[in-house]
Amino acid sequence: MVLEVKNVNYAYKSQKGKEILKNVSMQFEEKKFYTIVGASGAGKTTFLSLLAGLDMPVKGTILYDGEDIQAKGLNYHRKHHVSLVFQNYNLIDYLTTEENVRLGGTKTPQDLLEKVNIPCEDWKRNVLQLSGGQQQRVAIARALASNAKVLLADEPTGNLDETTAGEIIELLKRTAHELGKCVIVVTHSKYLAAQADEIIMIKDGCIESVTELSD
Amino acid sequence: MNSFQMAWRSVIRKPVKSVLLFFVVLIISLFFLSGMASRNASIATQNKTKQAVGAGFLMEANEENKRDRADEILAKKTDGEEGNFDGVTVKKIKTEYGTSWQVSYDNSFQTLLIGDMEKIAAVSGISEYNLTTAVTAVNPVDFSRIEDDDVDQSSDLLCVSLIGNKDMALDANVLSGNVTIKDGRMITEEDANVCVISEELAEKNSLSVGNRIQFNDRRDVENSTVFAAEIVGIYTVQQKMTPVMAGDTFRSENIIFTDLGFPEKAEGSTSGALYEKAYFKVADVNQYDEIKKEIQKVDIGWERYDLIDNNGNIDKMSKNFNDLERVSEILVIVVAGASLIILFLVFVFWMKGRVQEIGILLALGTPKIKIFGQILLEAFLIATIAIFLSFMAAPAASKITASYLVQQQARQADEQSVIDEGKVAKSAEDSEETVTGVSVTVTPELMLYDWFGVALLVVISVGAAGILIARKNPKDIFSEIS
């Protein structure tokens, strides 16, 4: 078990204690592809943010390899334990494709760009000149560039057409099964959710069900 | 990639924000340099001007003190009697309305005391000193004065004016550059019974150096003793000396410079000479202020005197240039304040435009301090280029600024002069005309100050703008992006 969530509660300070997550507990393992599904406002993205160390739970703990992620600091957790992929790609607009991947921590971004099928003529181009699908692949390459065992993705196919979305899903699956990472994806897409090893259903801030899917 | 590589790429590849900051910093830096250079230029000009007119101090009798002393004497010594009481003359005058008392002072009462002046002259740092008599009206015996044919002379004294000097070269009219010798020489301390006349008077009477002219007491032109003075020089003026009183007696052309002792003889004074001004020349202008302090320590009856910087003109000139210094300082302060606000707004604009980038870097585990370090580095890269460019443009910009400020000061001085017209008796035109320009130098020291000043403003502005972002956690930033 690489990541464990224990009795986590979360509430926005600005919303007078209204709980977004209520006593959530969950364990995540390497080499597995998880999807988190649920209605809008159920708390999926907040859950992912806490896993990513973008915010702290009000109560409860999140453990990485058995250690509280706050022990070494959330910055450390974000830099070394997890990597993130967003719906809107979140690439740095003044850097090239290669340079964006290099931000993830690798000195040889070319291998990763090949892995995610970015043609070499695009490596030196400004990243904003690439198509949406290519940009998302670059974002995944950047996430893979770090040695983090956990890859977190928030609606990674939300802005993509079906074909491209399918390619991205395949890439994420390969990342989990071939590269041995723990991939956790928040999605509204039933198709994407169905590709996971486990589907976590969140409803009203609680985990309603965890469904394990067999091949 | 390290922060420098990121910063460099951001500066080069996002030219709009870089160019905006570049021009803002360039203008700020130029204003700073211009303000500081103008401030220094003003001081330099002030000192240079002191030297040019002969740095020194002028001593005059304090008019209020004269009245106080006279009142004291009259209260103690008179008892409804006429007479001269310690230099204060009281005379009963009968008019059709009754009897009134006329009070006048003789020379012994009004004069500067030579003993006091010599004590001041002995102060270390005073190289020379001069005494000047009051303008003395005497009767011209064997020559004609210059008159305005269109003016009725019946109310005039029909005299010429004598100004006696211990050393004519230190007379205020000469020091200001207004009076220069056209022929012959000036009067020195060793001279007796000599004079220097105007070129107009010489021409009218066909007089030249070596001739003698005669004077006597205007109050008894028939019987008083006639005194002759040898003409040792003929002077010319740049601008006519302003008369101390109305009438052709005191007109510029009728002023005759003499040795120190001559006026009292020619006017038939029975109460000695009337020394009206003393001028003390400072040997080293750089010690001007220290010498002033030493002079003020001299043990004399200071209540009798007014100590004036240089010839009075300089005092005014210094004031103008002190104003310039003050204006320059205000310019620097205003620029600093305005720059801080402008830079803060520029960086807020920067930060707002880079929220996504900041969020991405935070998501990648980059500490906030490193992100602000990168932004600061970008600001420094741009600012450094702008500052260096401003160093090159600064000499021209500073000159323009300083000239503008000087023009403003000169205009202000002119306006003040017009306002003061008629209030102040002047023996010569102001010597402000000698200041024709301002020398402005942008020194390496100023550049260093400028660099530190602008760098400090950039750090403060980035810090202040960064607080807006630093207070947010990464999740809030991503919510904002979404």
Image: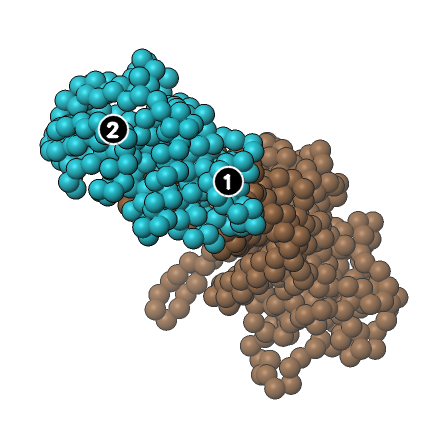
Chain colours: A cyan, B brown
Q: From where the camera sits, is residue B332 visible?
A: no
Q: Give amino acid for label 1.
A: Leu
Residue A25 seen anywhere in this rendered image of the structure = yes
Badge 1: how crowded within 10 Å, few (<14), some, or many (20+)?
many
Pointer 2 residue: A214
Residue B396 in the figure: left or right of residue A159: right
Instruction: Identify which amino acid the numbered label 2 is placed on.
Output: Ser
Q: Which mark is residue A113?
A: 1
State the SS at label 2. Answer: loop
Which residue sits furthest bottom?
A: B150
Chain for numbered disc 1: A
Is residue B404 rendered to the left or right of residue B212? Answer: left
Circle 1/circle 2 CB separation < 8 Å = no
- Quadrant where the C terminus of chain B sits is top left
Task: Tell which of B333 and A106 is nearer to you.
Answer: A106
Viewer-proximal residue, A6 or B142?
Answer: A6
Identify the element where label 1 is drawn: helix
Residue sitting nearer the eye, B258 or A154:
A154
Which x, y percent locates residue A134?
43, 48
Is B413 rendered above or below residue A22? Answer: below
Q: Position of residue B125 (x, y in %)?
A: 72, 36
